[in-house]
Image (cartoon, grey):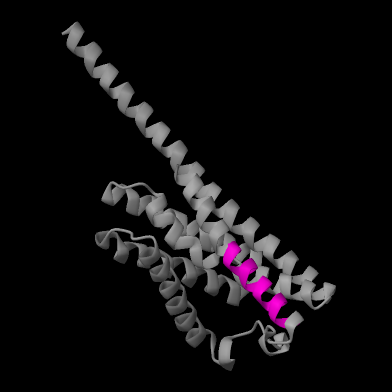
Amino acid sequence: SGTLRLIKALLTATAIAVGYSIAVLIGSVTGILDYSAIMPTSTGDIFGTSVASSTVVYTMAGTLGTLGYVLMNRIKAIRIAPALVGGAITVLLWYLVLAKTGDLFVSNLVGAMAGTLYAEIAARVSKAPATIYLIPAVISLVPGGRVYFTMLGLVRSDYAMAGEYAHETMFVALGIAIGIVIVTTLFSYYAKIKKAIINAKKQKTSNNNKNG
């Protein structure tokens, strides 16, 4: 089902982060890798640039991430461009809210809602399952980096760092999940109400024809 495909995509992204962390663990134990060189930097605007410049960079990076996903999963060529638009919209709104509020939960909630809303609309326009557009739209929000730094903190026995990133990961994941559920639930109710109205009109027309 579509839900299972979404869960699979999120688990795949998480597995990549965990796998990378295991590689770091092996490298640090054997002395091959100096993990201090790959510690997280400031969470502020990247490269010390303005919010506007950072917004452009993050949006482009998110779009490239979406492109990588759609190519890896061999999505039909006709649906690649709409999928990229969904990814760009999601990351754009995510970063704008994050830059404004600094709140990981709210920014990911808004980003996920925007991506899901776009996916539902695109699905109706193209007459395709919503998950075809939903997964590429939200894949860039998956907190793979935070999962990685959580594992890295455990590897370094830096439990304060591990706890901090685990806490952030939880809020990001919660924001994504709730954002998706809110929009999909609203669209589900909308579809049911629309269907009920159509059926009622058909029944009324049928009754009028019988009476006539």
Residue drawn at the location 41% of the way across and 75% of the way down: 64
Pick out the residue farthest to the bottom.
Answer: 48
Res 102 visible: no
Q: Is residue 39 left or right of residue 15?
A: right
Q: Which residue is at the far top?
A: 211
Location of the N terminus by quadrant is top left
Residue 165 colored magenta? Answer: no
Image point (38%, 60%), residue name? 73
Is residue 111 in view? yes
- Horizontal relation, residue 184 to residue 67: left or right: right
Q: What secondary structure prevails in the magenta region? A: helix
Residue 187 against residue 84 in the figure, above or below: above
| Magenta-tinted stretch | 14-28
Query: Can you say which quadrant of the picture contains the C terminus?
Result: top left
Q: Is residue 103 left or right of residue 185?
A: right
In reply to whether residue 26 is colored magenta, the answer given is: yes
Question: Does 133 appear above or below 145?
Answer: above
Residue toward you, 95 or 210: 95
Query: Residue 146 appears in which quarter of the rendering?
Result: bottom right
- Rendering quarter of residue 51: bottom right
Residue 83 percent coordinates (x, y): 36, 62
Please report the residue visible at 65 percent of the width from the left and 75 percent of the height from the top: 23
Write down the quadrant of residue 122 in the picture: bottom left
Q: Residue furthest front?
A: 30
Asked if 88 appears above or below 130 in the picture, the reply is below
Which residue is found at the position 57% from the left and 87% from the top?
A: 46
In this view, the residue in front, 149 or 138, is 149
Residue 90: x, y in percent? Answer: 47, 66
